[in-house]
Image (cartoon, rainbow, N blue to C red):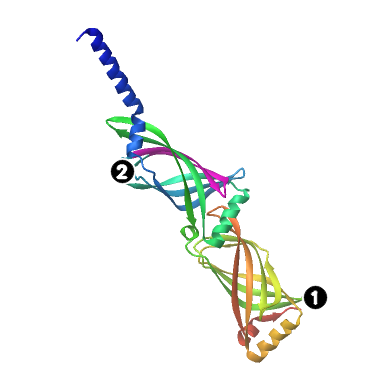
Amino acid sequence: MGLRKLLLILIILGIIISSFIYFLPDIGYAIFFKKPSIEIIDVYGQGIQDNHAYFIAKVKIKNNADLGVFLKKINADIFYKGKKLSTAEFSGNQFIEAKGEIILDVRITADINDPLLKDLVNTLVINKKDSVEYYAKGLVSVSYFGLNFERWVEINDVVILTFEKFVSNVGWNIKINGINVLGKKDEKLHIQANVTATNLSSLDIIVKKATFNIYYNNKKLGSGYYANELSIKANEEKNILVDVYLDQSEILKQAINDLVNNHSINIEYNATLEVYSEKFLVGTNYTIAGIEKFSMPNLTEGIEIKK
């Protein structure tokens, strides 16, 4: 074999080997890569600064590939109803074994004044679930055939958010302990109810304000409000004074007559609470409704008339 021919063969082999090494990440990607499974298992607020809310999302990532990888970075845009809601990022050097899973703390940044954020929270409260879409780029480091490679991997998917995942229980218990008759105001009977409110949810909240309506036999008796800020922890109960204004109407007379004659009546109520969660750094409106039974002995013990 001539020198020239040997040199040509070496050059061709060099080109083949160089091409193989150059395209090896793409070859390995095609052979080994499988789309990971991603699940958001918890979210909590980290703080607010300059109109931006910062959250930490606990994200479970399952590596569905047959090869272990080091996850170094994540940059993601999160969309809700087709509009950008927030950004997410992670930086580190986290190994995920083949077919294995890990839980990462991913930092999410959102505009606290963005109506999309409140819209998402309200939808979760009412419908108990919703979905967001993300477009993410992850920098992974992987070894195969004795060589180390880094590659940006692009993923987009839809994640279902379930309300019960973040708040296991939601509810209130309302008990009226007594009533103070304060007099008339704007042709309405002004009373003040001593109420024990119990937060049955698994979330500490702040009630910014509350408005409510009360009914008897499906007819409106009056309305009321609670204007003071109330901080109440999960499963905590607090006594508050609520101002109530009753319409001087036939239904009020009927309610009083039925109470005297039957010794008890049922009063229905529905209330809208403006609540704020320090854990999630967001507020929403929450509606509660119920029936409170008034018995003559209990009611008369709690009645006080102020002149």
Secondary structure beneath label 2: loop
**Would residue 213 appear left or right of 49 to someone viewing this image?**
right
Mark 1 surroundings: few (<14), some (14-19) or many (≥20) residues within 10 A: few
Predominant secondary structure, magenta span: strand
Q: Is residue 196 among the parts visible in the rendering? A: yes
Give the amino acid at mark 2: Ala
Identify the residue position indicated by label 2 in the image: 98
Q: Name the spot of residue 235 as percent of width and height, x first.
A: 50, 66
Secondary structure beneath label 1: loop
**Would residue 221 appear left or right of 6 to someone viewing this image?**
right
Q: Name the spot of residue 265 as percent of width and height, x first.
A: 63, 84
Q: Is residue 89 among the parts visible in the rendering? A: no
Q: Earlier in the sequence, mark 1 or mark 2?
A: 2
Q: Quadrant of the C terminus?
A: bottom right
Q: Name the spot of residue 249 as percent of width and height, x first.
A: 76, 80
Give the amino acid at mark 1: Glu
> 195 and 212: which one is in front?
212
Reply above or below: 284 against 181: above
Q: Quadrant of residue 285?
A: bottom right
Q: Name the spot of residue 157 as percent of width and height, x first.
A: 46, 46
Q: Quadrant of the N terminus?
A: top left
Does residue 146 belong to the magenta stretch? no
Identify the residue position indicated by label 1 in the image: 187
